[in-house]
Amino acid sequence: MIQQKFKCPHCGEIASFYGNPGERMAVSCPACRSKGRITIPMAAKENHYAIEVSHLKKIYGDLIAVNDISFAVKTGEIFAFLGPNGAGKTTTVEMIEAIRTPTAGTIKLLGFDTKNGFNQVKERISILPQEFHSFERFTVRETLTYFSHLYKKRANIDEIIDMMDLRSHEKKLYRTLSGGLKQRLGVALSLVNDPEIVFLDEPTTGLDPKARREVWEVIANLRKRGKTVFLTTHYMEEAEHLADHIAIIHKGKIIAEGSLQELIERYGEKTTLFIKSCQSPDALQLLEEQGFEVHSQGNGDLTVKIDYKEKVLEVLAQLRHDCIEYDGVDIRRSNLEEVFLRLTGARLTEEAEP
Amino acid sequence: MNLKIVFIDFLYNVRSWTRSRGTVFWSLLFPIMLILLFGAIFSGMGETTYTLYVQDLDQSENSTAFVGILNGTGVLTIEHVTTSDPISDYIREENIKNLLVIPKGYQSNITRSYIDPSVQVNLTYYFDPTEQQTNQILRTVISNVLSGVNMQISQGRPVIGVQEESTVTENFGFIDFFIPGMIGFTIMQQSIYGSIERNTKFRKDGILRKLLTTPITRSEWILAKMLFMLFLAFISTSVAIGVGILAFGIKVNITILTIVIVIATSFLFSGIGMIIGRFVKEEETADMAAGAISFPMMFLAGTFFAVDAMPAVIQVIAHALPLFYVNEGLRNAMIYMNQSEAVLNTGIVLVFAVIFFIAGVLLTKWKED
């Protein structure tokens, strides 16, 4: 199962589809809904992906927790699985980790189907479960040593301690550690077997901003060490800060995926240029005549919607050309929050699991 | 099965346990406190008068006078024994702790001793060696009375003597009854709560989810935990026996049946703990469920008081409880040396252990629904 991007011949939307090399399949464009058929190229390399999920589904009674989702995670990237609580993130990641059994669909880790071959990849993956708490009366070093002894392949504990900046805490009992240190140790635990894939389920939930930043640094370091990181989070800024690739899940379905840049370009608002205290009452009309979407905020403040960042210079040049003075300008780019708002009609909040 | 992983997990459990003062207290010191407390209350410590059973086989003027002197000391309450059964049977059936037998021919032999100085009369004092304090006092009283009587009849020549016989295999004190019960109770508590912690708390903390994705198997993990529970069971058994011997002088027989019962009890209640842990997800609720099962069992299954002394309905309930057979089995194997009963109790405990442990293992899930 591989991922292939196709451009919609009707609206130009670039969308990702999954299938086996050579497979011809019916698809519909996520933007304009036009239908068509595509063929996955034979030349694509299957082992390019560390994780491949196809038509995954999980149903509890009447509740469809995960609804026929497909995606693939490239080797060596940080893949953020973003969504509000209750969207199906943890259910999905726990199916990938073989903790839950899917109702339907297939999952491949490092090329092995997890249904029958999960034991073959246990040595090569590692997880940090959501709200993980380790053994309270083990020290940091003992905790690392305990988990490392469960594997045949073991990383050097001292190297991990140094890499995670845990040296001054190695003799402290787990229960005496701060929340940030516990999560840092949790990430450290996921390295004791020098895994190829690291799953981190909401690793910064409940941490203060400083501790969250510390954990981000640690996760960013994993990418430098060549690890594939599958990160579930409901923090927009976490995905923006860390992820190479983001999949947004909402009510059990993946509603968008791509790099941050791709998502913003595809689903975000236009860049907004704020012009403060514009001295000329004709500025609005002048810019509109040039084809810009301009709104007056009162007190001479104007906002100009811009498609491409190069257009900013055009606007400023136009103002200078017409000798229109102003106090200053500010540029605000669209972000993931706006993407999510536009896709779902709601802000991403910490709602309870259904 | 990777035994190295099992051994490492076991060692880490022991290390973690020794660091928990609370757990060590409840596992070791609490049972010791209960043994000392109940032992002190029910073993006759602090008595001011002592009951002495007397069987006067001579029924003569002299023997009646001797009993009257004993009674006159004010320390003893004399209970007259008139049974025609063998005295050893009577002692066992009536649970007699101290008994003095005045032999037939007591008066005639004293009379003969005036002519033939070699003639002596020997009384027999049956005593329960587990009641050391009471024995010491009764010996002193009997010895003083005999000295006075010998002085009167022969100017101090020991015409009347006393020989002692232990009732150890037939006559037991409360502490002999209590210590096996305490061992059974402690193993039950450790095993149930230990299993619940590992199945409920570890699930809540994500440890089971983490372990599920590591190479350790569920069987290896359960085996490691059971080794640890057995370690705790033997530690607490040793401590209870040690305290019983040092503080109360109990006589304990460690037989293979004793060891089998300790092992089976650990598996039995670990299985019950696993079953609770499977169905009760919340840690606090699981603790309450464990308490709801273990505390009534503790009182109803003859841990502190003999089931025979309880109302008939309670006795029926007690016979349905696994802890009852654990307690009875330990008592019969360790103290009473009643091997046939011990074998029967052990067999029943083994059946309970197999059923509950297998059910517990089958119901223990690492996977989520």
Image: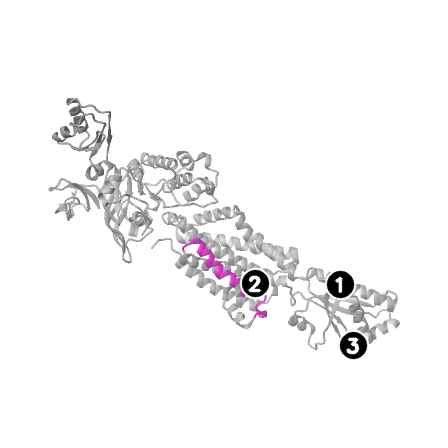
- Horizontal side of residue B279 vs A93, given as left or right: right
Q: Same chain for the residues at labels 3 and 2, yes or no?
A: yes
In the image, residue B307 sits, relative to residue A100, either above or below, namely below
Q: Earlier in the sequence, mark 2 or mark 1?
A: 1
Q: Residue at x 22, y 42 (%)?
A: A342
Mark 2 sits on what residue? Answer: B303
Q: Give the foreground label among 3 and 2.
A: 2
The disc, 3 or 2, on the residue closer to the chain's N-terminal end is: 3
Measure how far apart labels 3 and 1 are at the Cα level. 23 Å
**Which residue in the protein does label 1 denote?**
B139
Residue placed under numbered mark 3 in the picture: B59
Give how far across and how far down residue A159 sits, in percent. Answer: 40, 35
B154 sits left or right of B91 in the view? right
- Residue B283 in the image: above or below residue B308: above
Q: Local crowd at mark 2 within 10 Å, few (<14), some, or many (≥20)?
A: many
Q: Quadrant of residue A63?
A: bottom left
Q: Could you classify mark 3 by the number of other residues whose Cα lies within 10 Å: few (under 14), some (14-19), or many (20 or more)?
A: some
Residue A247 visible (yes or no) = yes
* Residue type highlighted by circle 2: Thr
The amino acid sitting under disc 3 is Gln
Callout 2: chain = B
In the picture shown, does residue B299 fall above or below B209?
below
Label 1 marks which chain's residue? B
Stretch in magenta: B281-310
| The one of B64 and A86 positioned closer to us in this rendering | A86
Q: Is A75 in front, or is B122?
A: A75
Residue A290, percent from left and from top: 12, 29
Locate residue A261 relative to residue B166 in the image: left or right: left
Q: Position of residue B314 (x, y in %)?
A: 53, 69
Write the residue at 51% across / 63% down.
B296
Foreground residue among A168 and A246: A246
